[in-house]
Structure formats: C-alpha cells, structure tokens
Image (cartoon, rainbow, N blue to C red):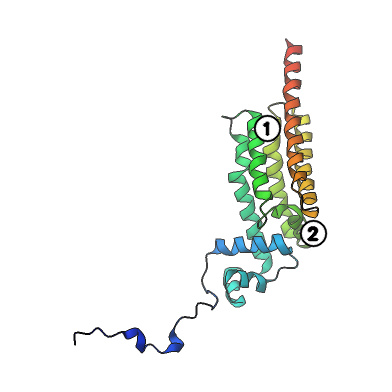
Amino acid sequence: MGNKQDFTSLVPSPFVPDLTMPKQKVDEQFIIIQSLKLFRKQSYYHTSMADIAAACGLQKGSLYHYFPSKEDLMKKVIRSVHEYFKSRVFSLAYDKSLNPNDRLERLFEAAQEIFLNEETGSLMGNVGVESALMVPEFAELVRYFFTDFFHAVKTIYLDKYPEEIANELAERSVAEIEGSLMFSRVFNDHSYLKNTTKRILNRLDKGNVSRRVEMETKN
C-alpha cells in the first residue's frame, strides 16, 4: 500500500506520443515565415503546398485549414513583408529627429540587413517580379511595396533637392537597389548591393552642395 504505482507503465505502447509525427497546430505567422524561406530559396513557381506543409510540420491537408490555396498564402506573405518594411525600414525616412543623411543611411542599412539574409532575403526582388508576372493579383501588392519604398526615399531627397529632381533620384535609387540585388544573387557577391548603397548616399551628399549654392544665390 505504501508503494506508489507507476501508472505510466500501464499505458499501452501505441498510445505513447510519436514525436516524429507532423505537428497539427502551428501559428499562422510561422507558416508565413517558412513559406517566405521556401519562396526565396526555390521560387514561388517551384514551391508546392506539400513543400510548405513539410517545412511547417503539417500534413498537406492541414495546411489548407490555414490557407485555401498557394495564391492566398503568397498574398499574405507579400503583405507581411510589406508591413515589416513599413515599420522597420520605411519609417526611418520620416524620422525628423535625424538629418537627411542619417535617415537615408539608416534606411538602407536596415534594408540591406534584410536583403542579405540568406533565408528570407528580398521577396520583393526577383521572387516578387516572377510572382507578379504569374498572378496578376500579386502585381498590385508588389506595386504597393515599391510605391512606399519610392515615397520613403523621395521624402529624404526632398530635404536636399527640388521635387522634380527628388522624384527622379528616388526612382533611380530604388531601381538601382533592386538591380544590385539581382547581381548580388546571380554572382553570390554582396558587394554589388553595398556599392550601390554608397553611390546613393554620395548622391545625397551632392545635394548638400547644391542646396548651399541655391541658398547663396538667393541671398
């Protein structure tokens, strides 16, 4: 009577949890992150729902309880990446407590850190373009991202240049960043992106001289 009985020994072995079985419940954000990694690595076209389910530890059928299709999942991934950039990167452009040079430098440093991440990288680069070409609904979401990117950079240039020139420089800067991302991936060399960032910052420095000359002329 004094001995405690080990009831676990009475549990039939088939009822012992199999830790190798796929998990059946995961957080939606976890699925989004795993999908982002796969889309970045394999491209949207070459990634299947079965691939995503396996990466999340889910049965393929269970994944459809979260997202009814790969297209719906990709839309959520694009929106999530966009919101992340808005809060962590683009917002730096509007921080008036910093001077324009510091704002642009911090913006591109934050963007560069994300772009050069080997797993998540830049979804809005080659993967975003590929996806936009395949599914028209994606194109609008990708455009929203680049529009916000453009306006963030333009806001900084407006402190140094007239609007027409700031508009042109912002368009050029965003295009150069995306082009350098492609080169960085093709040649597996991050210096393309880093050198582009330096050129963009130097361009803003030239604006300092232009603005001083303009003010001196008016005086």
Determine which of the numbered discs, if any, sits on residue 134 in the image. Answer: none
Number of residues whose C-alpha sits closer than 10 Å to that of mark 1, classed few (under 14), some (14–19) or many (20 or more): many
Q: Secondary structure at mark 1?
A: helix
Give the residue at x 64% y 69%: 52
**x 58%, y 34%: residue:** 95
- Quarter of image, res 32: bottom right
Quadrant of the drawing holding the N terminus: bottom left
Q: Position of residue 30 (x, y in %)?
A: 56, 63
Under mark 2, the amino acid is Leu
Q: Residue 156 bears which disc, if any?
A: 1
User: Which badge, 1 or 2, is on the more N-terminal residue?
Assistant: 2
- Callout 2 environment at 10 Å: few (<14), some (14 to 19), or many (20+)? few
Q: Position of residue 164 (x, y in %)?
A: 78, 30
Identity of the residue drawn at 65% across and 29% down? 100
Quadrant in the picture for the C terminus = top right
The answer, for residue 161, to whether it is visible in the render is no
Between the C-alphas of marks 1 and 2, the distance is 31 Å
Pinpoint residue 66: horizontal percent, then vertical percent.
Answer: 57, 69
Q: Among all residues in the image, which is located at the extreme left?
A: 1
Up-down relation of residue 216 to residue 32 (above or below): above
